[in-house]
Image (tube, helix red, strand yellow):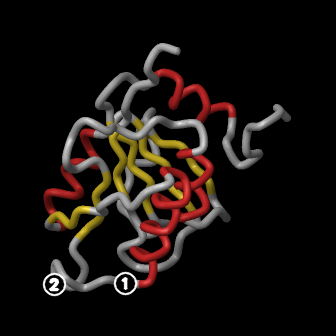
Amino acid sequence: MLKLIDPILSPELLYALRSMGHRHDIAIVDANFPCDAGDERLIRLDGVSGPRALEAILEIFPLEEQEPQVAWRMIAEGDPAKILAVFEDYSAGLEKTQAKAVELSAVEPDEFKDRVRAAHTVVVTGERRFYGSVILRKGVIPPQ
């Protein structure tokens, strides 16, 4: 255990977060998301909801601030305007950790899956709600 570090952040996840560079992406995906079990970028947080994982990660992860889009979700059921409860939960976690509203940009399912494949790290959660996945872009920590 470490002080000020959420205990759901495993050693593997902390290592991955620390290894990421500016503008690298991390995908937080639901339990049904198709992933290759042999993928070295894959970190499992079974039993942890997606929004809970997002909040724990964003407590120590600097979100990019210089780009207009820094957080993405998949378009649900072919309707970009459709806002599912899981999207609302992710948006609430973004606002809570960033102390401001952050747009959760909607992208087509195929593009979203391509972005997950290109992400630096993929965190598979226990989130069971459909479309319960997001991608976040890493920012920087400015000098003091």
Q: Circle 1 sits on which residue? A: 84
Of the pair 118 and 86, the residue shown nearer to us: 86
Q: Earlier in the sequence, mark 1 or mark 2?
A: 2
The image quadrant where one finds the N terminus is top right
Q: Say whether residue 100 is left or right of residue 47.
A: left
Dot 2 surroundings within 10 Å: few (below 14), some, or many (20 or more)?
few
User: Could you say where residue 121 lies in the image, as x and y percent from the top left?
Assistant: 42, 38
Q: Position of residue 125 (x, y in %)?
A: 55, 59
CA distance for labels 1 and 2 = 11 Å
- In terms of depth relative to the viewer, which is nearer, 88 or 40? 88
Determine which of the numbered discs, if any, sits on residue 79 in the image.
2
* Residue 13 percent coordinates (x, y): 58, 36
From the viewer's perspective, tell me whether residue 40 is left or right of residue 10.
left
- Residue at (25, 80) in percent of width and height: 76
Q: Is residue 64 above or below residue 93?
A: above
Percent x, y for residue 9?
67, 42
Closer to the camera, 11 or 21? Answer: 21
Along the horizontal axis of the image, is 131 left or right of 47?
left
Label 2 SS: loop
- State the residue at coordinates (21%, 73%): 75
* Three-letter code for the amino acid on which mark 2 is drawn: Asp
